Image (cartoon, rainbow, N blue to C red):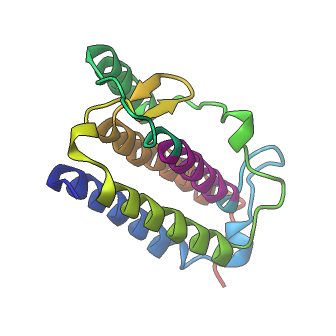
């Protein structure tokens, strides 16, 4: 694996592990708690993150089979930076319908196993990604369009960070269940 990609992937893994270590301390009641009926629970947030990464992996798997891919240029870089700024802002965004969480997401343990499997697949993909494709457009983000693998990994990390803030808001709700 390219050393720069390996560093970004390790940061992504550290972020996921830190989040799961924190969530492992919560009760099933806390994980399924929603502050108000139309808001997501922590399990639904996790499900959304997993669906997003799964969709990313499916797209990467198809795109890598292309014989030639154009190089990501300045427009991709600007759009990627704009997405990072948006995800770091206090703004809230509506999830694309195809990755919106179900009313009853899978049990927390199943979510953790599924995320582990997807991350393992991402690591395996990055291991075999030819270096000459590092700066090629390899992923099409639903809002900003085509970006390279570095920008894709940054998106995944910023996306999780954005939803960690959401999890913190859920946990700080006045009616959040006490631990037990």
Residue 150, image quadrant: top left
Q: Is residue 111 left or right of residue 84?
A: right
Identity of the residue drawn at 17% across and 50% down:
4
Residue 90 in view here: no
Identity of the residue drawn at 19% across and 53% down:
2
Measured from the top left, where is residue 127 in percent x and y? 30, 60
Q: Is residue 180 left or right of residue 118?
A: right
Q: Which residues are magenta?
A: 44-61
- In reply to whether residue 59 is colored magenta, the answer given is yes
Measured from the top left, where is residue 83 in percent x and y? 42, 27
Identity of the residue drawn at 70% across and 56% down:
44
Identity of the residue drawn at 39% across and 57% down:
125
Viewer-nearest residue: 126 or 163: 126
Task: Reply above or below: 69 against 12.
Answer: above
Residue 106, image quadrant: bottom right
User: Quick one: quadrant of the N terminus?
Assistant: bottom left
User: Quick one: quadrant of the C terminus?
Assistant: bottom right
Q: What secondary structure predominates along the stretch shown in magenta? A: helix
Viewer-nearest residue: 88 or 77: 77
Measured from the top left, where is residue 145 in percent x and y? 48, 23
Measured from the top left, where is residue 79 in percent x and y? 38, 20
Task: Reply above or below: 141 against 176.
Answer: above
């Amino acid at each position: 694996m390219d050393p720069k990609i390996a560093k970004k992937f390790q940061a992504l893994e550290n972020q996921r592990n830190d989040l799961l270590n924190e969530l492992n301390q919560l009760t099933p009641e806390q994980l399924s708690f929603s502050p108000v009926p139309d808001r997501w629970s922590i399990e639904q947030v996790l499900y959304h993150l997993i669906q997003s990464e799964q969709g990313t992996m499916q797209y990467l798997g198809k795109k890598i089979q292309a014989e030639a891919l154009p190089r990501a240029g300045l427009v991709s870089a600007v759009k990627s930076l704009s997405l990072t700024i948006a995800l770091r802002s206090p703004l809230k965004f509506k999830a694309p319908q195809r990755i919106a969480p179900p009313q009853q997401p899978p049990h927390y343990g199943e979510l953790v196993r599924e995320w582990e499997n997807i991350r393992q697949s991402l690591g395996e993909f990055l291991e075999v990604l030819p270096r000459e494709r590092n700066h090629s457009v390899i992923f099409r983000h639903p809002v900003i369009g085509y970006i390279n693998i570095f920008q894709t990994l940054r998106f995944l990390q910023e996306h999780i960070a954005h939803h960690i803030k959401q999890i913190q808001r859920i946990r700080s709700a006045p009616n959040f269940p006490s631990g037990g």
